Amino acid sequence: MLAVILEANDPHEKEIITYFRRFENLTVYLQEICHRQTKKKVIFLSGEIDKEQIKKCSSVAKILPISSNYPLLSRLGDHSSNFGFSYKGVDFYQDSLQIFAGLNAVDNEKNVRKVMSLMQSLGLNCTRMGAFKPRTSPHSFQGEEEKCLQYVFSAAKDYEIKVIAMEITSEKQLEMIVSKLQLYNDPPGVMLQVGTRNAQNFELLKALGQQKDFPVLFKRGYGITLEESLNAAEYLAAYGNNKIIFCLRGVKSLFAAEHRNMVDFAQISMLKRLTRLPVCIDPSHAVGTLAGDLDDIPDIFNVCAQGIITGANMLLLDVHPEPLSSPVDDGQILNFEQFSLLLKDINFCRNSYVKRKGIVGAKKNIFAQEEIYS
Ligand code: PEP
Ligand code: MN
């Protein structure tokens, strides 16, 4: 694969794409690659082409060979940590942190409002609200589905929530979300969550790739390799959407018990090194219990700390006013008091991460770092 980086604001972009599309053996992908301050248009070319034929385009700034197995997500040899995107005025970069705490499963309007009001009072402007729940058993609660969308979006407006993470399992659900958002002049943002069970639902990934209105929170598959999950995330980019966040939520393993999954947050820095994607952690689904250690610190707090102190960019967390009344996953959900305490711990860990960058990162010359940024 070759990456052809275009000059900034090139007026001939369309002609250049048309030029490359003429080559029969070539697959052409156009990506907009965002840094915090700059945007670059990059054309990825898969197939046979002579570099001389590329140079015929006057506005090519640089040509790079890309060896990554997920080239559209790759870093293009760039070491910087400000890849990402901004959505509804909220920053999602490899050096920022956003907190999405809220209802794993929306149960009623009162609880939606209580959660959003808490977020607002804590100075947070994002939340999670599960309307469509993929469940192991068809007899389990499937979510409030379409009927909750309007009261969720209206509450978001009232409590100044800018982005809601919401899982969808089909294109039909996306249409429902779009049609409800049309009722607002300035609708709240929705981050579409691809759940672990759908990590390799390629038709869903293609559909979410084709639309560019909503960013996608892609959860790693729980029973497939990281490489396979990254290839699945590559589908989103291949179909045109590069507002993607990669979420670690643990993997299924017999070795994990008593945790629900084997916590995988050690992979945060590796994912950032291998891709341009901001990385999210979901301690609730990774750990699945509120049990604690001998210092009375719950495991969820401890793994959350591990993720934040190593630079996680987003946190997805289950919070409910009365966790035991939640229709799903009640054993892992924090109540308001517990979440407010966790937030203090999160701030402490984030500050520690920033300090660690100053202490360890400043000594980068003592580590061999050549060519590790794919
Ligand atoms: C969820 O976040 O509500 C969820 C179902 O998570 P996962 O897909 O990671 O199991
Ligand atoms: Mn769940």
Image (spheres, rainbow, N blue to C red):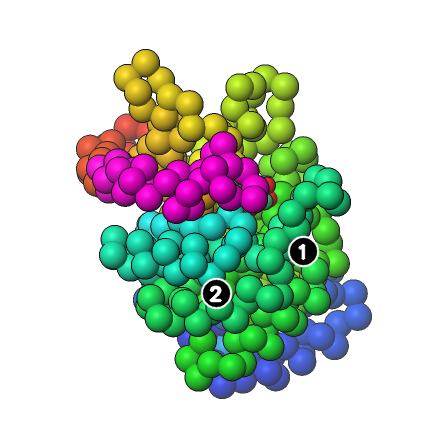
Mostly what secondary structure, the magenta segment? helix
Q: Nearer the viewer, residue 215 or 259?
A: 259
Residue 97 location, x and y as percent?
33, 50
Which circle's residue, 2 or 1, is located before the other in the chain? 2
Horizontal arrangement in the rendering, residue 220 relative to residue 123 (left or right): right
Locate residue 146: give its quadrant: bottom right
Q: Nearer the viewer, residue 345 or 370?
A: 345
**Residue at the image position 67 percent from the left and 56 percent from the top:** 169
Q: Is residue 10 shown to the viewer in this render?
A: yes
Locate residue 210: give its quadrant: bottom right
Horizontal arrangement in the rendering, residue 260 relative to residue 93 (left or right): right
Q: Secondary structure at mark 2?
A: helix
Residue 208 location, x and y as percent?
63, 63
Q: Which residue is mark 1?
A: 169
Q: Which residue is mark 2?
A: 152
Q: Is residue 1 shown to the viewer in this render?
A: no
